[in-house]
Amino acid sequence: MANSFLEASARERVHGVCDAGSFQEILKPADRISSPHMALLEQPVAFDDGVVIGRATLGGAPVLVAAQEGEFLGGAIGEVHGAKITALIAKAVEEKPRAVLLIFESGGVRLHEANAGLIAVSEIMRAVCSARAQGIQFIGLIGGAAGCFGGTGLIARCCDVLIMSEEGRLAMSGPEVIETVYGVEEFDSRDRALVWRVSGGKHRYVMGDVQALVADEVNAFRNAALGALDSGKVNFDLHNLEAEHAMLTQRLEQFGDCRDAKQIWQRLGLPSAEELALMPANEFVEATASARNVARGAR
């Protein structure tokens, strides 16, 4: 499991994805910048507040990197956590790196400081959009055990490119949240197969929500990030926004009556969910190529 992206810590992911020895951390744990709210609530703190930020190179090109640590409060965003990411993006506007890498692992906003966390999410989203408007590329990586949910899921969808493993999950609302609000009949959070069919990497790739599906290997994420970096695409304009809205409208018309990813895959003419679940990432990408174009509304 030494090369497993899922099993790696935030710092291990950064060091594995970026060029060896190139990462220079900003606001290290030794600086002891942690949330003031957690101490008031007599809760444990982390001296990096659950996110690692800094400079590095990727394929020799300068990049800025932020990686959330799922082992601390599920990577949830609080005031300091969010401020570190926002400040990193502000630095990107000044320094103009080739790209900003955002390594996501978060259940969303930290409930202990919910209002501050919600504000932080909005500030990060605004900063990402502002930086993209100035030509800075954002590459998101999703493959952690805590998934990428809530406000973090919204931030992820603001990126130019998303790279995801089957083990990763991406959604606005987490399974437990949906079950709590709408009942177990609507969504059974204990049905792990259902959870991964709906929010897992394979389904998100088929639907076109992520641009690359990779194996659960740090090297696979690195290679995909290098490929995204080489493309250098920043499609942040009104034409692309309208195209995205049109795609979402078409998707709702096509699949709005489906209750499960199984029904969507069947409608797209894919093999059974059981067969797809057993396919490695590279085989899955090949098997679903044409269906993905249909789901994306390609002409």
Image (cartoon, helix red, strand yellow):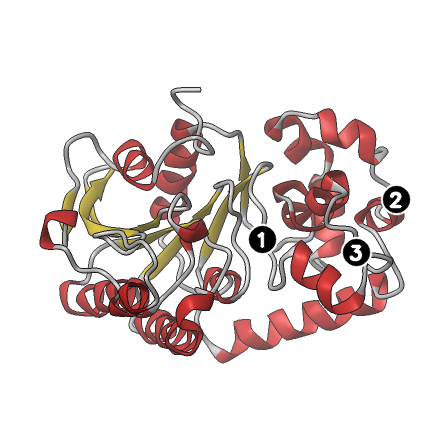
The quadrant in which the C terminus is found is: bottom right
Sequence-wise, which precedes: disc 1 or disc 2? 1
- Give the foreground label among 3 and 1: 3
Instruction: List the residue tagged with mark 2.
Output: 266
Distance CA(mark 2)–CA(mark 3): 20 Å
In front of the other: 238 or 197: 197
- Give the foreground label among 2 and 3: 3
Q: Amino acid at mark 1?
A: Leu
In front of the other: 182 or 64: 182
Tell which residue pokes out farthest to the front in this image: 42
- Give the foreground label among 1 and 2: 1
Can you give x and y, in whole percent of width and height, for residue 236 in the image? 43, 71
Sequence-wise, which precedes: disc 3 or disc 1? 1
Can you give x and y, in whole percent of width and height, for residue 258 in the image? 87, 58
Q: Amino acid at mark 2?
A: Gln
What residue is shown at x 15% (from left), y 32% (from top)? 21
Can you give x and y, in whole percent of width and height, for residue 17 in the image? 32, 36
For residue 170, the mark is 1
What residue is shown at x 87% (from left), y 42% (from top)? 269
Sequence-wise, which precedes: disc 2 or disc 3? 3
Neighbor class of circle 1 (other Cα within 10 Å; few <14, some 14-19, many 20+) is many
275 horizontally vs 13: left or right: right
